[in-house]
Amino acid sequence: MRAVVRLVTEAALCAVVLSACTDGVLPGTGPAADPPSPVARVKIAFLQDLSAGDAALRTAPAFQGAKLAFDTAGLSGDLEVEVELVALDTRGDPETATLVARTMAADPAFVGAIGAPFLTDQRAVGDVLDAAGVPTITLSTLGPDLSKAGWTTWRRAVADHARVGSAVAVFVDSLPGATRRGACLLGDGSQVASGLVRSVAGPLRAGIVLRSRVVADDAELAGVADAVRDAGCGVVVWGGLSGQGALVRRRLVEGGLRRVAFVGADGMKDGTFLSVSGTGGRGTVAACPCADLSTATELAAQRFIQDYQADFGLPPGPYAAEAWDVARMFVQAFREGAVTRAEVLRSLWAVDRFDGLANTYVFEPTGELAPGAARVHVYRAQAGRWVAFQEG
């Protein structure tokens, strides 16, 4: 367990005080009031894989978005349940993931789970949680075949890797350089990279002239520019994460290959890539199922951004808004009186459409988003920030 955040509602206490004041009697001066009803205490797990060195930075926005949603609901005074948001680390290991899931299953206080972005080993977790009846909503694109597992307690609130890869492929095929000279597909050997490269390679019409794994040592990074130059590709698709992707992009620019387009996915769309790549990252494109609300005009979106910055000191990062929405799905179930796994599951699954800040979520019986709701946004690195310019 990496972190535990307890979000306590004071609804019962407020109700007692309000009743006394309405009757014109100050608390403590009139007849003894009946004690408030016990508040149900439940736990929601936030499952994340922190095995990579900078993984915590990538999952923090989603954790914080979910925390803010539960916190806001508790402060509203109409949520008569105490929610404990518990962050659990699967460590990128199937055995650890299974152990974590079994620990949750054995504790009836766990009435739901949120899968963090980039969560690996979801099948190991899902098998255990589904058998225990724990409703799970994931924000991880990994595992495009999870909907075929036969689970009845699982949903995915973002487009999966297959859809992200298709969006990348469509964008790459729209580039004249890729059409004429082909594409180089590079990754770092991680599950994130391997999954994305496979998802891009399938629908890609442009020729693949280089497919290579790049590790983070100086010797191999030094040869990246030469390998890309020898391949002659017009675009590099980076399947890995942001830190190493930024180093690869810098090597290409330093090697005189700035004109070669550089395209990635959600693993690259963060502040780390922008800061490490510097001016060399300008023009880089990243496809992500995460929405950017920074230009949203809706009052609810603006309030979310303001509250997030007030609590955490930074603008919402990737998947923060989606995590807020998923947490609000659980909040809606709690407001309907659900306090057990079965009740939460029944409440959640009674609704196949949810209007959130980041998306209108329409779920299919398989647990995946319906095609029209499985959005993928395309961003370009511009003036030190990611700017949305296309939706796939």
Image: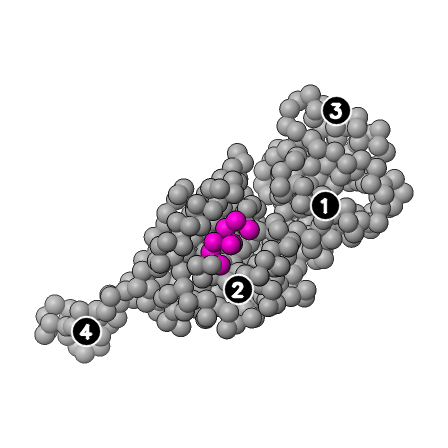
Q: Are marks 1 and 4 in contact (CB under 8 Å)?
A: no
The amino acid marked with disc number 2 is Thr
- Residue drawn at the location 90% of the way across and 43% of the way down: 180
Identify the residue under disc 4: 20
The amino acid marked with disc number 4 is: Ala
Query: Would you name the residue on which mark 1 appears?
Result: 198
Residue mark closest to the camera, 2 vs 3: 2
Q: Tell me if I can see residue 388 in this picture.
A: no
Q: How many angstroms separate mark 2 from mark 1 (CA)? A: 27 Å
Mark 2 vs 1, N-terminal side: 2
Which contiguous range is marked in magenta? 123-130
Residue placed at 51% from the left, 37% from the top? Answer: 51
Number of dots carrying numbers: 4
Q: Earlier in the sequence, mark 3 or mark 4?
A: 4
Question: Magenta region's main secondary structure?
Answer: helix
Label 3 neighbour load within 10 Å: few <14, some 14-19, many 20+? some
**Residue 134 at x, y percent in the picture:** 45, 60
N-terminal of the pair, mark 1 or mark 3, is: 1
Q: Are marks 2 and 3 in contact (CB under 8 Å)?
A: no
Report crowding for label 2: few under 14, some 14 to 19, many 20 or more residues within 10 A (C-alpha).
some
**Other residues around mark 1 within 10 Å, as few (<14) / some (14–19) / many (≥20):** some
Q: Mark 1 falls on what kind of element?
A: helix
Which residue is under mark 2?
152
Q: Quadrant of the C terminus?
A: bottom right
Say which amino acid is labelled 1: Arg
Is 162 displayed left or right of 170 in the figure? left
Look at mark 3 in the image and give the residue it sits on.
223
Q: Indicate whether 4 appears above or below 277.
A: below
Q: Secondary structure at mark 4?
A: helix
Badge nearest the viewer, 3 or 4: 3
